Amino acid sequence: METLELKPLEKKKLNVLLLEKEYNEPFYVNEPPTNANELKALQKSSIGFYRFVENLVSKVNVDYTTDEMGMRSQQDFQNDAIAEVFHKSNIPYFGVDIDANAKAYIGDALAKKIKQRNDVVKALDSLSKREDTTIEQEYMIALGQSLQSEIEDHQQEVNFSIRESWIAMGIMNHAREIKGKEEITCLHICSPEHMAGTKKLLESLNAKVETAKLSKKVIAASAEVPSSAEMENWLQSIQIQVKPVMGKGVEEAPYLLFYIDTDAKASPFDICMAYDAGYDAVIPYQDVNPEDAKNITQDALLSRGPKGVKHTAFLIGGKNAERAEEVFQAVKDSMFPPFKTSIIIDPAGSYTTAAAMVAKAEAALVANKLGELKDKTCAIMGTGAVGQIAAVLLAKLGCKVMIASLNPKRIDGKEHAESIGKLLAKDHGVQVQGIFAPTPQSKIDIINKADVIMCAGVKGVRIIDKEMLNGVKNMKVLLDINAVPPFGVEGIELKDDMREMLPGIFVIGALTVGDIKHKTEKEILRDSRSNGKEIYNYNTALPMARKMLEKDMLPGKLAMTLSYQPAKKSN
Ligand SMILES: NC(=O)c1ccc[n+]([C@@H]2O[C@H](COP(=O)([O-])OP(=O)(O)OC[C@H]3O[C@@H](n4cnc5c(N)ncnc54)[C@H](OP(=O)(O)O)[C@@H]3O)[C@@H](O)[C@H]2O)c1
């Protein structure tokens, strides 16, 4: 039995012209589709197609041709009108497809599932003849549907990933058989549904692939088929116009993300996230200032043309949020219609982290019937980018907000804390009280005033000791986002999710918040790839984070187990 093995050619170059057929070559493992026979008459190359191929091979040097065998026998395959074209031109013409033994092996496994499904259908048929069987029928239907869905998934896998691999191997193997040539050209005739998959596989094997399809226009005096007496005249009125369309349909501009970091070294965090979100390539730039950003943006967009621009996005990062905002502005100002595309700003992940903290606090309060976040007094411990943006989001929700500078080494702590309050008012139009709290007592004062406390201090630094919580009377919710021990709150654990750590003190740990942050950033990246909104900032991040939380909770809300219970018989 032949085994499936995909490997590139050695010391030879392979060019493949993938020519799209006019129909999908029929293929099935066990069961033909219901309309298989009716459509058979149309599943042949038209005169337009093979005349076009005749013309093509007279002008392009083709070493060999391949075509999907599908369900055709070798004899039918070689007697086809299209085969005739290649025979006349002395170009070898091979059928490529899944090996018959491999197909039989897969078919046996699938046949067992099909038999089970057919048994369920039979059982359902006999149940339908009885009267009091509704519940049994419901369960039987569920089982039958689940088997049918498994069968369809399996058939889909065989038809696409498995078959396409065999087809690509066939094309490569025939190229191997050609001796004495360094560059070989293959014409492969391909079903429309296999164009993309076959191209991808061949390219992964280092083949250079071009795609072409026929644009065919049939002009007839009337679309009605006339009686046999008028047939001759009607046929004479038909014209078939055939024109190749090269590289359309399958070829798509790749999705590119330009990652612009203001730090000296571009962070791999966002680069990995962008690949995982589906970008084809992420191009990092580091140590970028606004002038660099302008040049990068314009060069990138102008090179791609209006269509490619739709597949282009920019992500601005960097530890210093103010510098990142300046670069963001430069990128935004460098765009003009139609060279406008998505820009995401998330300095060192701070915007998505702040959004995740706020969304989590909001949902946790409601889920635990502790009121609404907008009515609470909130304290942010830490004046870094995460703390500042969390303060802005909370103030915009309507909360009373304090932000505390904690670093005991700060000589100008009071001025620094107050300046943060002023900065947030100036840049974001929100009222936030800046407080310097380097000592345990100053922190206790803040804790006593706040209902919700969010610790956003530097990693590995303890902010709240258990002792500070001893005298606390009212209920508190404490979040911490420092994932490096010692954590920001003594006694908190990374995966805490509203654990009552002390009476009335509920805690949420760094990984619980981090998980939502991660999902939010990925969702933003995915959205920027498919939707192409203009700007993604902390205002966009909060609704996304809420959506991610809802999505997380949905499976739990919807999950249920149904067990079969016979209906009670009435006496
Ligand atoms: N879980 C996640 O997914 C996630 C994602 C991103 C970030 N983070 C974490 O979020 C936290 C905040 O990050 P960030 O970028 O906003 O800020 P940051 O630059 O890490 O620092 C935050 C604040 O910590 C304070 N600080 C510095 N040294 C201190 C010390 N010795 N003692 C007490 N406080 C000190 C500073 O306060 P003052 O300047 O006001 O004095 C500073 O503003 C970090 O722990 C980071 O690792 C978590």
Image (cartoon, rainbow, N blue to C red):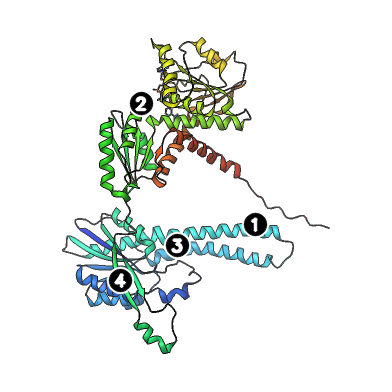
| Other residues around mark 2 within 10 Å, as few (<14) / some (14–19) / many (≥20) | few
Q: Nearer the viewer, mark 3 or mark 4?
A: 4
Give the mark nearest the N terminus, 3 or 1. Answer: 3
Give the mark nearest the N terminus, 1 or 2. Answer: 1
| Residue at image mark 4 | 242
Q: Amino acid under label 2?
A: Glu
User: Residue 106 shows which numbered tag?
Assistant: 3
**Residue 567 x/y as whole percent:** 74, 55
Give the mark nearest the N terminus, 2 or 4. Answer: 4
Q: Are marks 3 and 4 in contact (CB under 8 Å)?
A: no
**Residue 46 x/y as whole percent:** 34, 75
| Residue at image mark 1 | 139
When the figure is inspected, residue 156 is found, relative to residue 311, above or below; the finding is below
**Residue 476 x/y as whole percent:** 58, 21
Q: Are marks 2 and 4 in contact (CB under 8 Å)?
A: no
Seen from this angle, which residue lies furthest right?
571
When the figure is inspected, residue 432 is found, relative to residue 543, above or below; the finding is above
